[in-house]
Image (cartoon, rainbow, N blue to C red):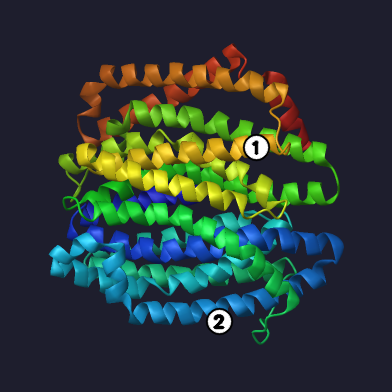
Amino acid sequence: MVSRVLGFARDMLIANVIGAGLIADAFFVAFKFPNFFRRLFAEGAFNAAFVPLFAGRLTTDGKEAAVKFAAEVASVLGTVLLVFTLAAMLTMPWLMLGIAPGFTDQPDKFALSVDLTRLTFPYLTFMALVALMGGMLNSLQRFAATAAAPIVLNVVLIAVLLGVRHGVLPDPGRALAWGVAAAGLAQFVWIALACKRAGIGFVPPRPRLTPGVKRLLALMAPALLGAGVVQVNVVIDVILASTLSEGSVSFLYYADRVNQLPLGVVGVAVGITLLPLLTRQLRSGDAAAALGSQNRAIEFALTLTLPAAAALIAIPGPIVTVLFQRGAFDTASAEATAGALAAFAAGLPAYVLIKALTPGFFAREDTKTPVKVAVVAMIANVVLAVALMQVLAHVGIALATALSAWFNATALAVLLVRRRHLAFDARLRRCVPRLILASALMGIAVWWGADWLAGPLGGGEAQRIVALASLVVAGGGLFALAALGTGAVRMTDLRAAVSRRASP
């Protein structure tokens, strides 16, 4: 949550300093490009294969053997990605033709995008090693250091933006790109120190394809394809948006950042904690406990994302205006971003459900099935995006992302149920329709409240902030009352959860 709040502060400063024009579009492409490969190599495919293997070795062979395995993997992974990073930096003009083909109509924007992406690309190698060490810490039930690592990125970029704003750094685009690379190094040092404190520090040996590394690569292959499919969806958004009017890439970025708050806080937390938990429960033969964990993860995800989605769909305009509309970010940019935000939010519960359902496959070392589902979802996303952008421009791209996410989540759930790896228990079946009702009531209320507070929401900055904060607090309180009143959430369940937390 701290990371996301600081991320908001960072994005508010970006909007204030560079708005949604040429420099912003170029930087967001430069930032997204290495992040695409980070999620592809480091977090998606790697975590899906590495965490179950590392957690399994911890359980069966002990910490020393597990750390040795991690060191062997780090050596191979780091070497491969270092070579890949250098090759990408050398061939960046040709790679940019694939990631942002629409920029070729503006040579200045294209050249700036190439320069900035070369500066940000080393971030990939640092973050790959951060993902490996973070997976080790998560397997030991040490989640805080890994979850806090993005705070370092936000602090560095905020410092850079303040330097730009006060004239210390004259070139905002290049300053931000250098900041991304520096933040990658800082996060690597942060996680390395956390591993040392946890007693799992290591020095990578000479790169060798040991049996453990070969097993990891075999598991990574289908997961890499699956993660690639998911991340290709993100890149497709950029490719298509680059062919639209200037600022479209930025509108989608800002909208997605707001949408990422509940997704990042809830979805990532569910995915990170559920995978090692399911792995241990299944390895110990406790299928009933694994089933219960999966149900509670789904319940937790929906309890937090359904009301968030309802609020983002009901009042996207006031949210975007208060967060971003100042400085170089004008009214037209706010309106364009609000439309994309409402479309992205329609898929918010699905994005989080995917993260709650895929561990059900990965914990059983099945990395192929989610790939097949993701391939079909990617095809659906491309077809829908191309069709909808003809009518809705950049909003159509966001809506296609949301619809394809719902297809992905539904397909994963159906497959788990058919394989008898998932059965919705009575508590989940009871609470879901009640959560939908409570969220709908809250959404209608905040929409009406935004209309009633139209004056303050359209006033000065202080008035807008107070009015939006009032809507958020009132909406949260109303949802809590509606959830308790409808029985979506029971006081007995809350007391039981607090009791478990308080027990030694």
Cα distance between the residues tagged 2 and 1: 36 Å
Residue 154 placement, left or right of 355? left
Residue positioned 54% across, 69% down in the render: 128
Check disc 2 and give the amino acid type: Thr
Q: x and y percent of residue 434 in the render?
A: 57, 17
Residue positioned 67% across, 53% down in the render: 366
Residue 489 placement, left or right of 96? right
Residue positioned 54% across, 79% down in the render: 80
The label number, if any, that marks residue 297 in the structure image: 1
Q: Quadrant of residue 402?
A: top left
Q: Quadrant of residue 495?
A: top right
Is 404 above or below relative to 470? below
- Kindly tell me whether residue 162 is visible in this rendering: no
- Kindly tell me whether residue 166 is visible in this rendering: yes
Q: x and y percent of residue 1 in the render?
A: 51, 45
Count of marks placed on residues: 2
Is 76 above or below relative to 294? below
**Pointer 1 local density, CA inside 10 Å: few below 14, some 14–19, many at least 20:** many
**Pointer 2 local density, CA inside 10 Å: few below 14, some 14–19, many at least 20:** some
The quadrant in which the C terminus is found is: top right
The label number, if any, that marks residue 79 in the structure image: 2
Between 88 and 316, the residue placed more toward the observer is 88
Between 322 and 436, the residue placed more toward the observer is 436
Residue positioned 61% across, 42% down in the render: 356
Is 211 above or below relative to 451? below
Q: Secondary structure at mark 1?
A: helix
